[in-house]
Image (spheres, rainbow, N blue to C red):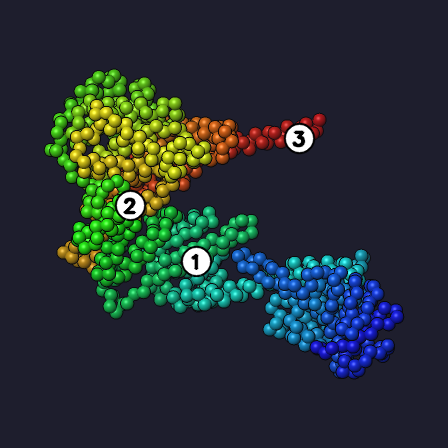
Amino acid sequence: MGCAPSITVSQSGVVYCRDSDDSNSPKPSFSQQQIVHIRKSNTAELSDTGLSAAGTTVAVFHRKERRGTISIEAETQTSKSTVSMKGMASEVSFGPIKLCQRAMQILLVFSKEDAQSDAFWWAADKGGYKCNIARNPTDALECFVEKQHDIIIIDHRYSKNFDALGLCRSMKATKYSDHVVMVALTRKSSVDKDEISILPLLNAGFNRRIFENANTATCLNELLQLEYGEVRSQIKLRAVNALLSALEKCSDAVEITNENRTVQFINTAYKQQMGYTSEELVGHEMEDLPRCDKNKPELMDSIYSQLKKAKTWEGMLYSKKKNGESVPQLVHISPITGQGGKVRHHVYNIKYQMAVNQNVFSQDLKQIDKFASELSNGASVRRQSVARIHSMTIEAPITKVINIINAAQENSPVTVVQALDRVLEILRSSELYNPQLTSQQVKEEDQMTSDLVGGLMTHGSYNAKRRTSGSDAALTKTNSSSQHSPSSPTSHMSQAPLEVLKMLERELAWDLNIIEVERITLHRPLIYLGLKIFNRFKAGSFLGISETVLRNWLQVIEANYHSSNPYHNSTHAADVLQATAYFISKEKLKGCFEPADDIASLIAATLHDVDHPGRTNSFLCNAGSDLAILYNDTAVLESHHAALAFQLTTREDRCNIFKELDREDYRAMRHTVIDMILATEMTKHFEHLSKFVNCTSKPVVRDSEDTLSMQSTGRSTPDSTSLTTPENRALIRRMLIKCADVSNPTRPLEMCMVWARRISQEYFAQTDEEKRRGLPVVMPVFDRLTCSIPKSQISFTEYFIMDMFDAWDAFIDCPEVMENLHYNYKYWTMEEENERRIKEEREREKENKYKDKGKK
């Protein structure tokens, strides 16, 4: 096959070729059985090295003889005028994989040369494909085994020459036929005859059927369709084999199911970990397999809900092995979308499985399981939403690390549990990346290092020695340190209208109608409500100021809220202040907070939106406002609120509520208030929520003197002792003001609707100004002509509110708040459905009008 042929061209333009072993010199003629010919389109020039001519196609034939039959192998050599891509590999994309497609190889199996075989030959030549011709089944099999073609076209028009079906079966039986495309060439059916069934061809192994057509262009089109269809599909299937091989060798256990959760694949690591074989799992629905009772139904429902939304989930799940043992595993579940953009597969990647030494820790494990069961039962009775907290899809990398450590503690001895709890305590620090130098380190290290750490990595002028205690110095302040006795709680409130006094008798009621307070106070709710709430918590006594100073301060602050804003005005500040007071009056926070926490929280709530312009941070940055430039496009409004609040407060003694605090207490109070105001910035919403969940939902280590069950597990539920550390109180304060700031969806429906309209009006005005000034439209959905307020409320509640208030409720227990939240959510859902139905009815009416006009 690989010999160099001798070539000659006759006067009529016929190119003759014979193997060089017969003769080294060209001859003008050969016997009919020793030569073959091809047509030449243009004049050729013959040189010592070969043939070359514009528009000329030269075919080199090699002749073989076996048992009286002739097998001809032909390899086309195309000139410059034909397809330029001949022999070049093309790239095929398969998801993220880039595959290289070689020049397609074709095997033609025809018992004799005719117009049809010539047509396919020339089509292959024009398409730049490599082509071989075989005249009998034996040579066809040998050629296929040697070349491993992409397409095999078998002549099935004349069954007397050879059995095409049998040849196809023989080829499909070889180990090289997995990805070859088998094509049957058949005669056209007569018009008056019924179409012959294609099932015999399919059963024999054929992939396609082609009707005879000696037109070269038609044959080329058929080959192109095969290349871009079946051949490329087979190339991708070859890549699937590589992927499956990688999965088999993967050290992580992998399980793949379809959208109905029917198991389709498990790899070797999965079989080894779980003890099952492929026959025992593949093809079975997961619901029919043994399930572990340790997974809460609420958790599983949450996972399935996430997967239906095409969102990944990662967390700890229990799985039951074949021997009945339940093992905790860190599982990553990825939904794979397919046809129609719907989820078609689920990939379970078991990243981590706890290893248990039964011989050493068997007794500990029994006690751990018993105690964990008691905790689980107690928790499920109190709050079902706790399960949802652990399944929230807001995990940051640090949260995943904490989850892995939590899983590692499940079956570890007491000493390991206690050590890992110490690790978790460090990870939950609000200053995770800031070094904390002890006094001993300050002595041992040079003073320059200490000053650099204290000056560059802290707010203000704290030194290293005071890093851990300075921010909470004011928390130790008691009423006995007051230098001034406050005025009587009713001294200024007594001057308020009776209607206001009566309304404010319920200042801590969650259903207090702040909109009505706004009306009867003539849009000055912050002064009246602020006086009532600050006096209730004895703020004047704690700060050492008179009620006159407190009133002056409230007047100055309220005057700097923009009454022209539909939403961010002093009524919103009063609403947040009232929510803060409601929350800190809860028993849980009473056990965690010190008096200064309460006062700092009330002050932060009062100041948190002062001088708000009624526009978002994004708007200010896009507009290049002075504030955005001043604060480098980072937390622009929150930084401005905090800075201006302290400027207004400390400008004059008559309204300076901090003037009686010593330097250290003032610095600590200022640090706390600023930290809370900055926490209202939404870009760090999920970071604050993740840290809070990790802080409040993780059990803590007990002393060795505790009960036997405590000794065996080394753990208990979070208590007030663990939550009173400065770091944990900071996390709780941030979540407190965040929940108070966006508590509108949890208020009674009447107020919830008012606040929804107000915030929408403010966003509408921003969108109008953005369009008018040619700025980027930050929130296009808030177009006053097209916006759906119910839909906006649903989206905001689902994305920001639900998870946060679930976690907050699980911590402080506020059923009234959650009842309003769920009721309001249902209301907005029904309103959105009504809007959608009305819109559809209007569209139908328009269609009917157009139809009526068309008839007329």
User: Which picture quadrant has residue 250?
Assistant: bottom left
Q: Out of 252 and 643, give the one closest to the viewer.
A: 643
In the figure, 805 relative to 35: above or below? above
User: Disc 3 designates what residue?
Assistant: 851
Q: Which residue is mark 2?
A: 456
C-alpha distance separating marks 3 and 1: 53 Å
Label at residue 348: 1
Whether residue 608 is visible here, answered yes or no, is no
The span from disc 1 to disc 2 (Cα, nearest Å) is 45 Å
**Label 3: element kind:** helix
User: Foreground residue, 710 or 61?
Assistant: 61
Q: Which one is in front in this view, the residue at disc 3 or the one at disc 1? A: 1
Query: Which residue occupies 50% across, 67% down?
Result: 245
Query: Which-is-in-front pick, marks 1 and 2?
Result: 2
Whole-angstrom CA distance, mark 2 to mark 3, is 73 Å
Task: Tell whether 409 sits left or right of 1.
Answer: left
Lateral position of residue 54 relative to residue 745, left or right: right
> In the image, residue 437 lies at what x, y percent?
22, 51
Residue 597: percent from left, percent from top: 22, 37
- What amino acid type is highlighted by mark number 1? Tyr
| SS type, badge 2 | helix
The quadrant of the rendering that contains the N terminus is bottom right
* Type of amino acid at the residue the image marks with label 3: Lys
Point out residue 506 in the picture as x, y percentages from the top left corner. 25, 26
Please name whichever residue, 421 or 5, is drawn nearer the observer in this view of the structure.
5
